[in-house]
Amino acid sequence: MTPQGLPRSTIDSQVMWARLISVVEEQAQALLRTAFGSVVREAGDLSAGVYNVQGEMLAQAVTGTPGHVNTMAMAVSHFLERFPLRSMKPGDVFVTNDPWMGTGHLFDYVMVTPAFRGDQVVAFFASTCHVTDVGGRGFTADANSIYEEGVLIPHMRIRSQDVVNDELLAIIAGNSRNPIEVIGDIRSLISCNDAGIKRFDGMMLEFGLENLDSLSAHILESSTCAMQDAIRAVPDGIYATQMTLDGYETPITLKARLTVDGERAVLDYHGSSGASRYGINSPKCYTDAYSAFGLKCIVAPDVPNNAGSLACFEVQAEPGSCVDPRHPAPVTARHVIGQMLPDIVFGCLAQALPAKVPAESAGSIWVLAMSDLAASGAPRFNVMNVGLGGVGAGPGRDGLSTTAFPSGVGTIPVEVTETESPLIFHRKELLPDSGGPGTQRGGLSQIIEVGHTGSEGFAVSAATWDRLVYPARGRAGGSDGQSGAAYLGSGTRLEGKQTHRVPAGDTLVVELPGGGGFGDPKERTPEEIEADLEAGYVTAAGAEKAYRGA
């Protein structure tokens, strides 16, 4: 026994668990350093993790997004259904970008590599990232089926006993407008798994492990028990709410009912809108991922995220709805619905835990997918940047400004996009008065203006732009955040979801949505209002309207 009274084996397990997390973080950093696409390299749109031989996630990297991590938590089991353990050989690597069995849309490739001890598989390392282009219509919500959205790679071996499947790479490259970047990212995914396995081999040797059975049982049991304890701390009851999003052809209604009963939490989306004809639908794996993330943020933020803790949540949805679309529904811009789900979960939890739940945030990131207007042939440029809105304020704190919640992705420096294309950013700055007023102010969004350096126009996809009509709502008496807006520099207003042409000599201007405020604006102190004025977070007119005239 140790001085703390814990068995030595428990301490060893905790040390090995921490080591496993550091191994997968190094795996993620290897991907970050070697990725070709700027959305991965700069914004960190990726994930990495390690799994036991049953395909259960044991540890995830700190670097990464909930949408990737939590969908990948389920994705590895699909590979095992198609490739039995006995068929796997050292040096094998498996791949897919199937939206329903991966991370929700074709742009994310999931790479899975078995780790061996002798001739036995003892673990799996998996990674995913967003690639620049997969063919089809490109990054747009305009498609009416998955067949229009790009090339779908079913579960396949991309490397067999260290021999890369060049024919498969040729198919992927041949269907992409950015073949160099896409193949570079796929090779980076393969390499980062190899890096993780190399560190894992060293760990196994150091601790004298022949398999992960005992450590896996400790991780999953500990996490399950901790999550069950956390759920029991939430008052039992049924909590229901709904939210309206801009949608595409019509507004989207999301309805949620959270049932908490002892150590069990069930989130039910029945009654939500049916699947859209356009690519804004959220496959069930993506719905599950962000729903569980929203629950965990409030109920148990400190419990490790793995198969054990995730198993404590059940998510139900109506087949054929916008949160459970069926093949071949279009899904490219699944962010629009999926990244709003934590906020609707918060709406349920606010009834059970009112002092712990923040106001709504901007939600879906605004992907600025921009390309030239070439009528034929390969595009001269096809780039992405990311616009970030404000985060909702919470009890005792203002909302974070220009921060991607819930995805957690970073922004792409304007210099990178300007290097990769003939575009130029005229403005990228905080947008005053965009955060919802409250005792605690919602996070500010930003205004971005982009033009072409030459005498040409360009195209931009508004696939993931939402909250132009329905803003982030305040909570506990707080006011809504400012709605988003998009227009040409010449004044023409632009709608969300569609693909727009920016004429030669004109510019694209987007104003991202702000976060909702928390608490009665009358309770915000004069000192805080003056500090906001001095920092330029609010204007004099905005402060007068929101606070002094409240």
Image (spheres, grey):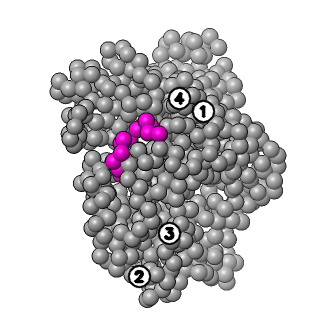
Residue to which mark 2 is pinned? 89
Give amino acid for label 4.
Answer: Glu
Cα gap from disc 2 to disc 4, whole angstroms: 49 Å
* Quarter holding residue 451: top left
Nearer the viewer's eye, disc 3 or disc 4? 4
* Residue appearing at x 24%, y 54% in the figure: 180
* Quarter holding residue 13: bottom right
Q: Nearer the viewer, residue 354 or 424?
A: 424
Q: Main secondary structure of the magenta part?
A: loop
Point out the image quarter for the N terminus: bottom right
Mark positioned earlier in the residue sequence (2 or 4): 2
Mark positioned earlier in the residue sequence (3 or 4): 3
Q: Secondary structure at mark 1?
A: strand
Asked if the residue under mark 4 is in contact with the one under mark 3, i.e. CB atoms within 8 Å, the reply is no
**Place of residue 46 in the rendered image (x, y in percent of width and height, measured from the top left):** 42, 54
Q: Which mark is residue 328?
A: none
* Residue appearing at x 53%, y 29% in the figure: 249
Nearer the viewer's eye, disc 1 or disc 4? 4
